């Protein structure tokens, strides 16, 4: 797909539903008793994979665009799937679903696409095996396809080596089915959508800053879920409006869960002209409207407990940093290497092709600004939705058009991404 410079972005967008919350609403609805109604569900490829997997376990799920109804009959009614559970490109689907499958007394096989086949699974399969699940796979259970025989589980006290909501959630979902109280402790707090949503579904949890405990044997009760817009998707338009001259954009109903708002903190520190209006304080997941205008940015340092609060935004932060005064340093972000692509390498290689001055490091990157983007090159998403969207925004400010290969990857989390750029550009 060839994309070129845009003179200005104006208008407003309703950002599609949050991917993390959409996955969880289907999974928790599927194991709850009763009818779960989901509004503003994200009909992106990843969340559709979650729906397809649970249908294969006998759960009735109606999906009409962003309206979804899940007819849950409780954990015990999940059926042994006759076919492979195909998670597509979705790390969240496979890791959280493994936590559920670990306690089910049946056999299942789980796999996904080429990218999933390279992503590490022992971080989840090891604690689940310790609890009593039988899981096998390539390289001793590190890589898909994975074969799972679930059954009786015993609680564990698990110290996760990395801050990861997927590891935490998988162990908690297994803990829900285990004998005793399971505790997960992380080095830094990761996104807490699982904890918030389990509470909505009637499960009690004990939480402190970096650990969560759950007592086994609790039954989920169906709930009504409103999914706010995905701040990770909004981030691309926050960046676009900051960088494209003479822009002013309003993003409606964006999720503002504090475990996800690192991008807002960083934009403010960089000097962005950003206003936030919080809405319905009663929703389990806070949300609000964001208004952002073009601004002059300066470099920042990003590390430590800020990293899990913006891990998926690092590709777009790198683009912002190319246009900020000074050198931006990103550290403690080695987790980027095990995402849909090695995002340290793909961000650096693709941005360099269009003129950026960026150095990959062991656990992050250094970006030297301000460097005008020349464009005029062929780049690729490498099948990674966030790299595809970052390049889509880079094209808006590049001197020459750029050719983005595998741009269709954006449909994993934001199928209407390019239409939304057109919508704002058309009004300019
Ligand atoms: O689902 P997937 O493929 O892992 O998606 C990504 C993304 O960029 O959309 C990561 F590549 O988001 C993860 C996120 O990085 C979604 C997620 C969740 O919903 O629990 C948690 C984070 O991953 P992790 O490994 O830190 O738990």
Image (cartoon, rainbow, N blue to C red):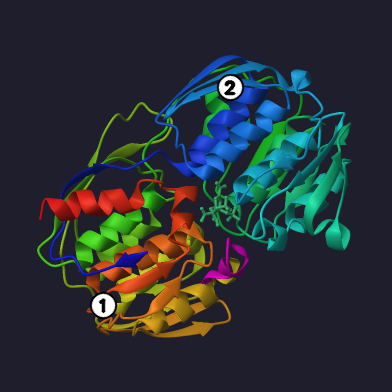
Q: Secondary structure at mark 2?
A: strand
Vertical order, 356 against 92 (above or below) = below
Dot 2 crowding, Cα within 10 Å, few <14, some 14–19, many 20+? many
Determine if residue 309 is in view. no
Residue at coordinates 21% horizontally, 64% vertically from top-left? 242
Vertical order, 186 against 181 (above or below) = below
- Would residue 106 appear left or right of 56 to someone viewing this image? right
- Residue 267 locus on image (x, y percent): 28, 63
Q: Nearer the viewer, residue 269 or 60?
A: 60
Vertical order, 239 against 222 (above or below) = below
For the image shown, how many numbered marks are present on the structure?
A: 2
Q: Where's the N terminus, which quadrant?
A: bottom left
Q: Residue furthest top?
A: 34
Determine if residue 138 is in view. yes
Residue at coordinates 31% horizontally, 70% vertically from top-left? 394
- Residue 348 locus on image (x, y percent): 46, 79
- Would residue 121 appear left or right of 165 to someone viewing this image? right
Residue at coordinates 32% horizontally, 53% vertically from top-left? 418
Q: Report, in whole angstroms, how far the alpha carbon at label 1 lies from the one at label 2.
A: 46 Å
- Residue 137 locus on image (x, y percent): 85, 54
Q: Secondary structure at mark 1?
A: loop
Q: Which residues are magenta?
A: 336-343
Q: Which is nearer the N-term, disc 1 or disc 2?
A: 2
């Amino acid at each position: 797909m060839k994309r070129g410079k845009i003179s200005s972005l104006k208008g407003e967008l309703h950002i599609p539903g949050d991917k993390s919350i959409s996955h969880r609403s289907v999974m928790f609805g599927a194991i709850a008793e009763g009818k779960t109604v989901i509004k503003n569900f994200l009909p992106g490829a990843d969340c559709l994979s979650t729906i397809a997997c649970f249908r294969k376990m006998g759960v009735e799920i109606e999906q009409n665009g962003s309206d979804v109804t899940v007819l849950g009959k409780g954990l015990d009614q999940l059926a042994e799937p006759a076919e492979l559970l195909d998670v597509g490109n979705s790390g969240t689907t496979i890791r959280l679903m493994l936590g559920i499958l670990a306690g089910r007394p049946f056999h299942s096989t789980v796999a996904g696409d080429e990218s999933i086949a390279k992503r590490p699974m022992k971080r989840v399969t090891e604690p689940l095996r310790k609890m009593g699940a039988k899981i096998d796979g390539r390289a001793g259970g590190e890589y898909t396809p994975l074969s799972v025989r679930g059954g009786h589980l015993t609680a564990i006290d698990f110290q996760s080596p990395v801050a990861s909501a997927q590891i935490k959630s998988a162990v908690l979902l297994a803990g829900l089915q285990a004998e005793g109280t399971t505790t997960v402790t992380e080095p830094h707090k990761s996104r807490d959508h699982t904890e918030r949503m389990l509470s909505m579904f009637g499960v009690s949890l004990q939480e402190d800053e970096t650990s969560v405990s759950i007592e086994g044997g609790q039954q989920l009760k169906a709930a009504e879920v409103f999914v706010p817009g995905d701040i990770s998707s909004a981030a691309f338009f926050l960046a676009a409006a900051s960088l494209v001259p003479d822009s002013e954009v309003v993003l409606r109903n964006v999720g503002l869960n504090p475990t996800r708002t690192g991008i807002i903190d960083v934009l403010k520190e960089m000097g962005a002209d950003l206003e936030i209006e919080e809405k319905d304080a009663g929703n389990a997941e806070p949300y609000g409207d964001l208004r952002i205008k073009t601004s002059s940015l300066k470099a920042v340092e990003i590390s430590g407990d800020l990293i899990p609060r913006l891990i998926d935004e690092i590709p777009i932060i790198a683009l912002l940093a190319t246009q900020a005064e000074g050198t931006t340093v990103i550290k403690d972000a080695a987790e980027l290497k095990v995402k849909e692509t090695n995002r340290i390498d793909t961000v650096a290689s693709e941005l360099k092709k269009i003129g950026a001055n960026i150095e990959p490091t062991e656990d992050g990157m250094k970006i030297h600004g301000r460097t005008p983007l020349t464009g005029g090159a062929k780049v690729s998403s490498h099948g990674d939705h966030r790299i595809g969207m970052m390049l889509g925004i880079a094209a808006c400010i590049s001197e020459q058009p750029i050719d983005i290969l595998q741009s269709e990857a954006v449909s994993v989390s934001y199928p209407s991404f390019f239409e939304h750029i057109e919508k704002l550009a058309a009004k300019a």
